[in-house]
Amino acid sequence: MPLNSLKIEDLLPHRSGMLLLNTILEVDPKVAVTEAVVNEDWPLFNGRDVEALVLIEVAAQTAGICNGLARIQKYGPGSDQKSWLVGIKQARFFVDALALKDRILMRAENSFEYEGYRQIIGTARIGSTVIAEIGLQAIQADDDHLPE
């Protein structure tokens, strides 16, 4: 499957209200950069704005983009999309809330990988301003080790 033909839905299992990403700007098996536009359908929307805590999910989905590409390259496009966020090592927020229509640029990089375990560093920006730095841990079992 050519890289330019991949869609977000090919790389992530998220749909409708839980899919927060709008655009893949850059992707390889180690790093992804995405854009997400804040809207009233997002989790943690309180009628005015969205709590910054949602950026953890934006970072996790962005990491899922590069890890999804690695999965497709190894197992093919029909392979299982499941992985599990198993830890939040750190989360530093430089804003309390996100305004509707804010354009979030998220960069997620696998800083450490061992078999299906990954440590991920995510950096969120609005324009050139860093609004969050997030460290995550994720596990993706290969097809031979997925639960039945």
Image: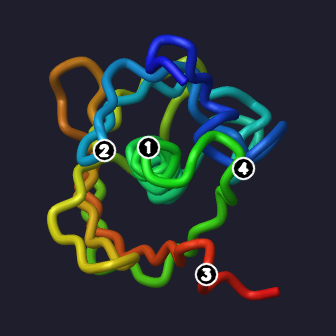
Q: Give me the C-alpha separation between circle 1 and circle 4.
A: 17 Å
Q: Nearer the viewer, mark 3 or mark 4?
A: 3
Q: What residue is drawn where x is 33% and y is 46%?
A: 95
Q: Earlier in the sequence, mark 3 or mark 2?
A: 2
Tag 2: residue type?
A: Pro
In this view, the residue farthest toward the top is: 4
Q: Give me the C-alpha separation between circle 2 and circle 1.
A: 9 Å
Question: What residue does disc 4 label?
Answer: 13
Q: Is residue 52 visible?
A: no
Q: Give me the C-alpha separation between circle 3 and circle 1.
A: 16 Å
Q: Nearer the viewer, mark 3 or mark 2?
A: 3
Tag 3: residue type?
A: Asp
Question: What residue does disc 3 label?
Answer: 144
Classify 94 as above or below 2.
below
Q: What residue is drawn where x is 61% and y is 23%?
A: 7
Q: Earlier in the sequence, mark 1 or mark 4?
A: 4
Q: Is residue 32 left or right of residue 16?
A: left
Q: Give me the C-alpha separation between circle 2 and circle 4.
A: 17 Å
Tag 1: residue type?
A: Gln
Residue 40 image offset from top left, x and y in percent: 75, 31
> Is disc 3 surrounded by few (<14), some (14 to 19) or many (20+) residues within 10 Å?
few
Q: Secondary structure at mark 1?
A: helix
